[in-house]
Image (cartoon, rainbow, N blue to C red):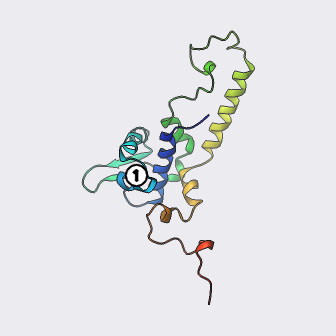
Amino acid sequence: MRLTKQTNYAVRMLMYCAANEGHLSRIPEIARAYGVSELFLFKILQPLTRASLVETVRGRNGGVRLGRDAAKITLFDVVKVTEDSFAMAECFEDGVAECPLVDSCGLNAALRKALNAFFDVLADYTIDDLVKARPQINFLLGLDEFPPATSPELRVPAA
């Protein structure tokens, strides 16, 4: 199973907004930070807005911000609104399977169990978890001019 670029950048957009807490984030800034097109991010913005994961503010000084606290947005929340299908095999799709074992297949049961385990893990991680795990994220995204002073690789040795 492979997540789409849409899901990947939806998570990244939410991380950017979380790191930029207290400020509106603008799509051109997010696009520049990740090296992706603004048009692509605007496309991703639609399902995120419908699901209330982000809010948009229109106007000259408008932008986007998280629709709720970053600690309350799980990766599962993002995946379920950005992925079109979780069909891991033909037998997951309604009315498509031609296999005579579709209703009593061990493979079908194993794949469903694996998919549910995948969803459970995604539900355990929030956008806040991803942002707080990387203290240098604001610097890396261009939100701060200087890296955090507590970063071990950036400490200046005492004289």
Observer-nearest of 24 and 52: 24
Helix, strand or loop status at disc 1: helix
Q: Amino acid at mark 1?
A: Ala
Residue at left offset 49%, top offset 66%: 139
Q: Position of residue 153 (x, y in %)?
A: 61, 72
Based on the displayed image, in which of its 4 quarters is residue 100 positioned?
top right
Quadrant that contains the C terminus: bottom right
Observer-nearest of 52 and 44: 44
Residue at left offset 71%, top offset 12%: 101
Q: Specify the farthest residue to the bottom.
A: 159
Based on the displayed image, in which of its 4 quarters is residue 128 positioned?
bottom right
Q: Is residue 30 above or below residue 79?
A: below
User: Does residue 11 show up?
Assistant: yes
Which residue is labeled 1 in the image? 31
Residue at left offset 47%, top offset 40%: 6
Q: Position of residue 136 (x, y in %)?
A: 54, 65
Q: Is residue 28 above or below residue 91?
A: below
Q: Position of residue 108 (x, y in %)?
A: 69, 22
